Amino acid sequence: MPAADATVRIALIHALEESVQPARQAFARHWPEAFAFDLLDTSLAVDRADAGRLDEAMTTRFHTLADYAVTFAGRGGHTAGILFTCSAFGSAIDAVKARSPVPVLRPNESAFEAALQRGDRLGLVVSFEPSRLSLEAELRAAAAAHGREVTVRSVTAEGALEALKAGDGDRHDALAARAAAGLGDVDAIILGQFSLARAHDRVAAATAVPVVTTPRSAVEALRAMAAAATSPED
């Protein structure tokens, strides 16, 4: 990664430590000039799973992390944007968006836009069950914003996240591929969490349909947003 005085600073806010590496790899491949820094609070994922829903206290924690990213972590260099990598917190991220002075990106919105370019029958794979229904709703909302209706088939790759946490990446990828293969006839498959991106090739081989990953889509979207913000006005 570039030094901290790089032109563009992007805050990455994570609720799973397994999301850190895929995000950094995506920046290294698709926007190496940016300086991306990480804020990690693994208690968010635990509390979200235990509560079964988002509550006001969790939303307040998201505001706190975002404020820190802009106000304190940005000292010595302007923070140009925030990327949340945690897919089960959509409404909390939207609340941050509404008051943030810098662009804020949900982890999946760019991947959804990319998948919608492939067709109206979309598959969604997650490995963190609390994300599944909220991501289905977000995907349908993204389609509705374009005046479209889509068929969404979603599946949880049972045991995949646990395998990854145990250090068994091969089993994680195999379980993701097996789950994706069960989605049937779809136009594209979205791997709905940053930690699932590593399974791209196994999923593509098992399904023979286009596979969209969230880290690459998000980084490319942030890069375009930053370029637009710094372009001279016509």
Image (spheres, rainbow, N blue to C red):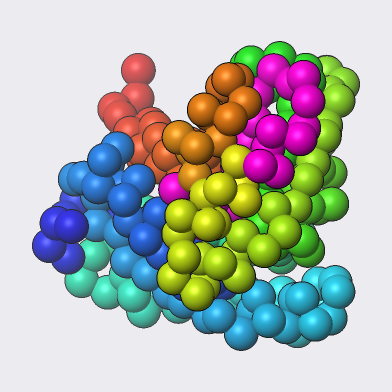
Q: Residue at x 29, y 37 (%)?
A: 30
Front residue of this view, candidates 180 and 131: 180
**In the image, is residue 185 part of the stretch drawn in magenta?**
yes
Q: Position of residue 114 (x, y in %)?
A: 58, 26
103, above or below 230, in the image: below
67, above or below 91, in the image: below
Front residue of this view, candidates 151 and 183: 183
Occupied quadrant, residue 63: bottom right
Q: Is residue 186 left or right of residue 82?
A: right
Q: Is residue 175 left or right of residue 217?
A: right
- The answer to whether any part of residue 192 appears in the image is no
Q: Position of residue 116 (x, y in %)?
A: 67, 22
Q: Is residue 33 left or right of residue 56?
A: left
Q: Residue at x 72, y 59 (%)?
A: 158
Occupied quadrant, residue 128: bottom right
Occupied quadrant, residue 122: top right
Q: Residue at x 81, y 72 (%)?
A: 54
Q: Position of residue 123 (x, y in %)?
A: 73, 32
Q: Which residues are magenta?
A: 178-198
- The answer to whether any part of residue 187 appears in the image is yes
**In the image, is residue 42 part of the stretch drawn in magenta?**
no
38, above or below 36, in the image: below
Q: Position of residue 165 (x, y in %)?
A: 51, 73
Front residue of this view, candidates 141 and 171: 171
Q: State which quarter of the image contains the N terminus.
A: bottom left
Total tally of numbered discs in the picture:
0
Q: State which quarter of the image contains the C terminus.
A: top left
Q: Residue at x 66, y 57 (%)?
A: 127
